[in-house]
Image: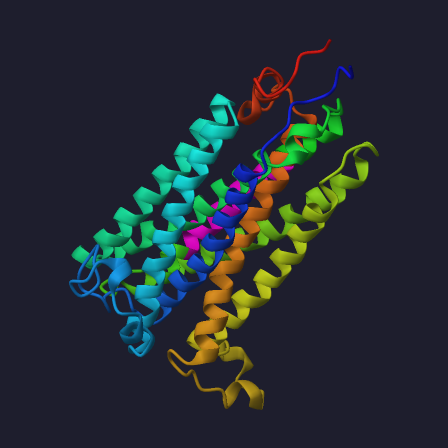
Amino acid sequence: MDSNLQSPISPWPHRLAVALALVTFPLIWVGGLVTTYDAGMAVPDWPGTYGYNLFRYPWQTWLAAPWDLFIEHGHRLLGATAGLLSIALVAAVLLTDRRRWLVAASLGAVLLVIVQGILGGARVLFDERLIAMIHGCVGPLFFAYLAGLVVATSRWWQSVNFIQSPSGEQMARLAWITAVLAYGQLAIGAVVRHVPLSSSPSVFRVALVFHLILGVVLAIQSLRPALQVRRLPRQARGLNTLSLALPALVGLQLLLGAATYVVKYAFPAWLDQFAFAANFVVQEKSLGQSLITTAHVANGSLILFVSVMLAMRSTRLFCRGAGIPACRNLWQTEMSAPHVRAAA
């Protein structure tokens, strides 16, 4: 018998993790629209919708409702769907996969959904911008968490072999640093979007400057994994596409960030000498403004998602824990899992 043979692995945990990620990304989009249109208070009660159970609110009324009510109730429905899928993920892991750390990780997804739901409800009940800002930070964090689950439940994760490579360990470090920077950038972006109306203009300016500086740092950092991937051993697989996608997404984010500033605050004053800038008029809550601003928010979460996927894959390939606290004992834990047969 082949000593490397593994027992059959159920595809359902991975399928549900992917489905949950596919639901969460549009959830972030719609959440961004809720903020853009100030629709958070379109439904004044929670957890119901105008006295109805969330799922029993008349769909005809919802589809024919004003735009702010439509997107707010849709945001709640997507959030509830994510909650149900996270519960299904836990059930699938418990029934088909006995890795204790993966069971704990799937339970963590449920916990994050609950926390995010409570924050969303508190935003409605207390109408506080600070809660809205925290709510906007937890959403991308949950999406990034799902990136880890998508990788950890995949067949790739359970079939690849460890590769000893100093350049590979460096790749893992670079990927994790990129993920941390991407999340920090999202957090500062949330501050920019949710600055209290009573704050002085200097608060917004300081947050915006930090957002711009960290954006430049992230752009430079995103290039490093793309360069590092060329130094990896040939047998390393599953990293090329992700490492190249990162700088592409960051480049797109820079363009979306500049476009967001223009559609919300107009062109910088030094461009007024040009007709296209001098004649430009900001149209508040227009379709173009909402799409560009929300795309900027969603693409930031996508950068974080790809960064975490790259970090997890690099960790799985090259890391046995030495010098990288985030992945200590990960390889040993995986190899001792019950679903892996011992060598004959």
- In the image as oriented, which residue stretches furthest toward the right? 234
333 vs 135, left or right, is: right
Which residue is found at the position 55% from the left and 67% from the top? 256
- Decide if residue 229 is on the left or right side of residue 36: right
Quarter of the image holding residue 229? top right
**Is 285 above or below relative to 51?**
below
- The magenta segment is 174-189
Left or right: residue 94 compared with residue 49: right
Q: Where 265 falls versus 256 (above or below)? A: below
The answer to whether residue 203 of the structure is visible from this angle is: no
**Residue furthest to the top:** 344
- For the C terminus, the quadrant is top right
Q: Quadrant of residue 282?
A: bottom left
Whole-percent x and y of residue 239?
Answer: 71, 41
Q: Quadrant of the N terminus?
A: top right
Task: Answer whether residue 181 is magenta in the image.
Answer: yes
Query: Dominant secondary structure of the magenta stretch?
Result: helix
Is residue 1 at least partly visible in the picture? yes
Residue 340: percent from the left, percent from the top? 63, 19
